[in-house]
Image (cartoon, rainbow, N blue to C red):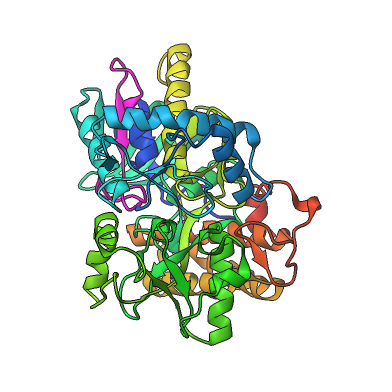
């Protein structure tokens, strides 16, 4: 079974058409930053499938990492990133991004972002894996919300930027490995062909492939799957980072409890009140996320308890409320006082480290297609992302993609388009399918068999189940967003399982109980096979 090249049938002679110099897909921090870097004489169309505020960037609590203290150095930040990345970071990319970070933070201030300050200077905090205080934050624990507020206001004021929300990207339009634009769905028009001289993909991650996740519902891997169908290379799809501390209250929505809580001194305790991290790593609660998540998993297995607990009761209550007002508010709805009560937490899927392969400028393997942010595998994070390095990656690569796209527009001449092109899916593929049931089954399976601790046996079972679902779900034509998201989740999940089975070692976020140690043989990136080969097995 080979998936259809496009999710839906279309005929260019019958659809609506739009044109832009630069099309940006995704309105998180990477997409908005790219838009703001494009000069006013070029028309930018920035689209997002939900509201402008709905992105992983908006929900980022901790902050943005950058060397801003005289006690800190670029070398320190570089070393911390390389250590967390477990041997798979690209040192040149790490150095480039980290050296750009202070200027990007200064640009955010210029754009109107109001960061928290102490004595007139930017307030800095520390998070797991960092050797120094270097994370700027806003509104205590709502950094992403404040940063996106400022960037969106700036973008709305730019006359050359058109923001279009409620627009689902179905597929990228390509010809002979050249990206020409995108096929999108927008009410009330329906299908729309957007032709662009350059395309920047900044559509975010795929946390919704797991039942337990910190991601908003929009994170269904649409950009990764669309790029994969279009021929772009994916790599390192086995590396999904699990955030160690997600509020766990049975029956409720999951809420992220920021890394900064442990950075300010909170303890992790088991159901009996013991600090278990002291036995697992000398850095205790400040160890990198992969180590903390795995330690929590072992603790829950050992105690047969569904969660562990964060304890802030020994910290100054005034400081706790000042730094974490959002977390305090959420916990209060469950009758928890974070200055006194232990907060029940467990790991949840948080950040996809793998993704579309890009070079040092953000260029993908498809001509005229650029990518930035969580949708990519840039070489910055290696096998495990250092806390608060993701927003800075989005800012740096958003800027780089814009610069590259502008250069290409200046050199590329007129807009190319396909005058008449038709794609049809067989009518039988429109048969009914319970989309919600299959989506829930997939997300539950990924938690059970592709979670924090993995094995060949469980992953082989997962591959068999996902293969079976793909055989009849990926050849269908859906007419709803839920159906398209299911197809994208299945595509991404299948790539993740394939990569995780191939990497017969444990490294970073990828831990295998049957291969519990790292191997120099695997100190390399895993590029996914072409989509035809992946599903043709």
On the image, the x and y values in percent for residue 78 come to 58, 38
Residue at 62% across, 51% down: 383
Of 140 and 387, nearer the camera is 140
On the image, the x and y values in percent for residue 380 come to 57, 40
Q: Residue furthest right?
A: 521
Residue at 35% across, 22% down: 38
Q: Is residue 245 above or below residue 398?
A: below
501 horizontally vs 278: left or right:
right
> Can residue 35 be seen in this snapshot?
no
> Can residue 47 be seen in this snapshot?
yes
Residue at 35% across, 43% down: 28
Residue 361 belongs to the span the image colors magenta: no
On the image, the x and y values in percent for residue 51 come to 24, 48
Of 496 and 415, nearer the camera is 496
Q: Quadrant of the C terminus?
A: bottom right
Corner quadrant of residue 68 = top left
Principal SS element in the magenta part? loop
45 horizontally vs 368: left or right:
left
Q: Quadrant of the N terminus?
A: bottom right
253 horizontally vs 299: left or right:
left
Residue 39 belongs to the span the image colors magenta: yes
Of 427 and 161, nearer the camera is 161
On the image, the x and y values in percent for residue 92 come to 63, 31
Q: Which residues are magenta?
A: 36-60
């Amino acid at each position: 079974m080979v998936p259809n090249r496009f999710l839906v049938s279309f005929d260019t002679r019958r659809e609506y058409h739009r044109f832009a110099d630069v099309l940006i897909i995704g309105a998180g921090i990477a997409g908005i930053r790219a838009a703001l870097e494009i000069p006013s004489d070029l028309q930018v169309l920035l689209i997002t499938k939900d509201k402008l505020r709905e992105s992983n960037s908006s929900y980022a609590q901790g902050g943005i990492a950058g060397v801003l203290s005289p006690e800190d150095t670029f070398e320190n930040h570089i070393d911390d990133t390389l250590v967390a990345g477990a041997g798979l970071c690209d040192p040149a990319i790490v150095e480039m991004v980290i050296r750009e970070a202070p200027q990007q933070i200064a640009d955010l201030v210029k754009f109107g972002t109001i960061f928290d300050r102490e004595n007139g200077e930017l307030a800095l905090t520390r998070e797991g894996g960092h050797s120094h205080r270097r994370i700027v934050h806003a509104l205590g624990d709502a950094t992403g919300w404040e940063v996106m507020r400022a960037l969106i206001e700036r973008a709305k004021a730019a006359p050359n930027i058109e923001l279009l929300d409620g627009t689902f990207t179905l597929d990228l339009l390509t010809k002979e490995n050249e990206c020409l634009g995108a096929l999108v769905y927008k009410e009330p028009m329906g299908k729309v062909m957007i032709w662009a001289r350059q395309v920047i993909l900044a559509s975010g991650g795929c946390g919704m492939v797991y039942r337990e996740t910190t991601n908003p519902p929009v994170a269904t891997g649409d950009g990764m799957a669309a790029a994969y169908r279009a021929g772009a290379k994916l790599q390192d799809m086995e590396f999904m980072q699990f955030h160690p501390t997600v509020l766990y209250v049975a029956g409720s929505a999951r809420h992220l409890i920021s890394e900064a809580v442990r950075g300010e001194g909170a303890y992790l305790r088991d159901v009996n009140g013991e600090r278990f991290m002291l036995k697992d790593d000398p850095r205790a609660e400040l160890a990198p996320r992969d180590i903390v998540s795995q330690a929590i998993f072992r603790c829950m297995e050992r105690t047969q308890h569904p969660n562990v607990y964060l304890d802030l009761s020994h910290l100054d209550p005034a400081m706790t409320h000042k730094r974490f007002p959002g977390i305090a508010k959420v916990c209060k709805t469950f009758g928890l006082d974070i200055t006194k009560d232990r907060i029940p937490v467990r790991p949840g899927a948080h950040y996809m480290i793998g993704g579309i392969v890009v070079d040092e400028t953000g260029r993908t393997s498809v001509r005229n297609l650029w990518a930035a942010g969580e949708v990519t595998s840039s070489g910055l994070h290696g096998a495990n992302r250092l806390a608060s390095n993701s927003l800075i990656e989005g800012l740096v690569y958003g800027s780089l993609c814009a610069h590259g796209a502008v250069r290409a527009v200046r050199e590329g001449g007129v807009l190319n388009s396909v005058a008449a092109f038709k794609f049809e899916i067989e009518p039988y593929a429109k048969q009914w399918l319970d989309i919600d049931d299959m989506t829930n089954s997939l997300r539950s399976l990924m938690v059970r068999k592709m979670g924090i601790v993995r094995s060949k046996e469980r992953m082989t079972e997962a591959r068999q189940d996902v293969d079976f679902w793909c055989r009849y779900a990926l050849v269908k034509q859906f007419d709803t967003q839920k159906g398209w998201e299911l197809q994208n989740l299945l595509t991404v999940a299948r790539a993740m399982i394939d990569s995780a089975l191939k990497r017969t070692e444990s490294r970073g976020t990828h831990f295998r109980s049957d291969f519990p140690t790292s191997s120099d043989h695997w100190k390399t990136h895993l590029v996914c096979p072409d989509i035809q080969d992946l599903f043709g097995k």
